[in-house]
């Protein structure tokens, strides 16, 4: 046990002190910082147009009532930055364009009334145009203007026959919830009676972060373990190490040591993200997403961390075994390619099935040990799953870790003494017979 701790400490200290690890960690922290601050940096170069960029003119050609309804509707929208400016309607488009440019407006709404009907009343809703220098409507402006125009059109058609509450219900989009057969049979009404839990963005974010974390951990730390073993073999350091520490202790020591290195790297990047998001201008941006961290799914987080740790050790042991049979670092990339493709497949199956977490592919993949660390996280967080499915998946994953750990230990004990030949199953079997393993 003391020797295992020595190997873990040696692996951790030796890798943390390397320039490549320090530079990689600092570079990732820098890229994350730049990514978080990118909107703010772009805004600095563009210039602060707050107050001007959201000023929109409004021209009511005989439709002042509709223009007022649009203004009133948008004024009640929370966190709204649009400010309307009444413009003089001289009937000349060139004059209106000059007014908009002189007042530094982002654009203006031109409400053109339709010709009156036979009885002298306006029978059709006016035509509305958004005139700007670019000839397009910004996405944030359109999101606010569209429901305002729909509300004004509803009022125009009903001519006061509906109350404000009824008009609000008409213009509010209908939310379509997905419910399984089991839910409808249990409740008798499904989502119609509000018994089904609504979709929580925190569930999606938690699942996405855990899946991405597992993929990058399996790839980065797995390759780190393999390269560490291969470099020791190529420099003949392995011949000295196996005289004092057994190959099995070396393998598990390196796996655990690199796992601690990965946790430290994740911690550094997590602290970097937290510090950057706590800055005042980033806090305002986060507030706009309306995320409630009190709704963080604890069960998804706990199960996700369990599958993350177990999945890491499954892949790490295999990477260590593959690294032990490679004598030159030039051959390492080709040797670990199957494991890299396997972890990539696990990530892609999970990430591209987030919108359909209960598909047949996801159900089958959640019982395959190499893909269950990602697909099970998605099914627990975003799908319908029974407890026995989680238990069976965990048991299969644990059995796979014990089996591949035993197999990797045998391969490792043989592989660290193989030199000069390209890794192959035939050569590996020969070596295992020669060493009586």
Image (cartoon, grey):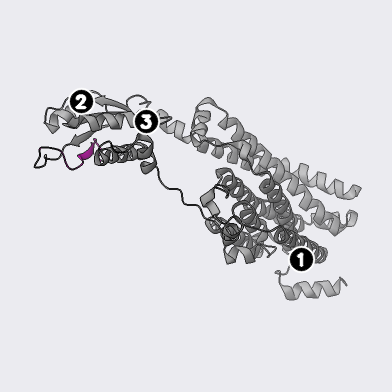
Query: Magenta span has 197?
Result: no
> Where is 92 relative to 370, above or below?
above
| Of callouts 3 and 1, the N-terminal one | 3
Query: Magenta span has 121?
Result: yes
Q: Position of residue 46 (x, y in %)?
A: 37, 30
Quarter occupied by the C terminus: bottom right
For the residues marked 2 and 3, what is the alpha-carbon distance in whole angstroms? 27 Å
Q: Position of residue 412 (x, y in %)?
A: 80, 63
Provide the residue designation for mark 1.
419
* Nearest the eye: 235 or 283: 283
Q: Which SS type dominates the magenta stretch?
A: loop
For the residues marked 1 and 2, what is the alpha-carbon distance in whole angstroms? 84 Å
Over which residues does the magenta segment extend?
120-135
Q: Position of residue 3 (x, y in %)?
A: 89, 49
Q: Secondary structure at mark 1?
A: loop
Provide the residue designation for mark 3.
46
Residue 69 location, quadrant: top left
> Where is 99 relative to 160, above or below?
above
Provide the residue designation for mark 2.
87
Q: Secondary structure at mark 2?
A: loop
């Amino acid at each position: 046990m003391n020797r295992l701790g020595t190997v873990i400490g040696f692996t951790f200290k030796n890798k943390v002190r390397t320039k490549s690890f320090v530079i990689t960690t600092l570079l990732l922290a820098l890229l994350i910082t730049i990514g978080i601050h990118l909107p703010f940096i772009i805004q600095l170069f563009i210039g602060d147009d707050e107050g001007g960029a959201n000023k929109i003119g409004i021209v009511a050609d005989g439709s002042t009532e509709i223009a007022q309804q649009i203004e009133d509707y948008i004024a009640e929208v929370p966190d709204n930055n649009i400010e309307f400016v009444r413009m003089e309607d001289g009937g000349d488009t060139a004059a209106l364009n000059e007014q908009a440019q002189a007042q530094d407006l982002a654009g203006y709404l031109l409400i053109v009334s339709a010709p009156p009907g036979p009885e002298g009343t306006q029978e059709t809703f006016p035509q509305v145009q958004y005139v700007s220098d670019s000839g397009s409507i910004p996405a944030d402006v359109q999101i606010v203007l569209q429901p305002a125009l729909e509300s004004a059109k509803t009022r125009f058609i009903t001519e006061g026959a509906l109350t404000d509450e009824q008009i609000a219900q008409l213009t509010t989009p209908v939310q379509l919830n997905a419910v399984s057969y089991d839910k409808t049979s249990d409740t008798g009404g499904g989502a119609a009676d509000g018994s089904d839990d609504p979709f929580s963005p925190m569930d999606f974010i938690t699942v996405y972060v855990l899946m991405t974390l597992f993929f990058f951990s399996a790839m980065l730390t797995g390759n780190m373990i393999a390269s560490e073993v291969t470099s020791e073999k190529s420099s003949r350091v392995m011949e000295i190490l196996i005289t004092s520490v057994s190959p099995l202790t070396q393998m598990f020591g390196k796996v655990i040591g690199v796992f601690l290195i990965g946790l430290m790297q994740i911690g550094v990047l997590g602290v970097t993200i937290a510090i950057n998001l706590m800055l005042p201008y980033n806090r305002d941006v986060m507030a706009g997403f309306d995320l409630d961290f009190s709704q963080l799914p604890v069960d998804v987080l706990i199960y996700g961390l369990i599958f993350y740790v177990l999945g890491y050790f499954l892949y790490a042991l295999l990477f260590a075994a593959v690294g032990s049979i490679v004598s030159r670092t030039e051959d390492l990339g080709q040797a670990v390619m199957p494991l890299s493709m396997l972890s990539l497949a696990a990530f892609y199956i999970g990430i591209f099935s987030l919108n359909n977490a209960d598909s047949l592919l996801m159900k089958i993949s959640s019982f395959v040990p190499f893909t269950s660390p990602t697909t099970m996280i998605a099914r627990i967080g975003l799908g319908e799953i029974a407890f026995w499915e989680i238990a069976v998946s965990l048991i299969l994953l644990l059995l796979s870790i014990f089996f591949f750990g035993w197999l990797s230990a045998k391969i490792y004990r043989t592989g660290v003494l193989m030199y000069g030949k390209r890794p192959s199953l035939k050569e590996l079997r020969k070596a295992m017979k020669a060493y009586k393993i």
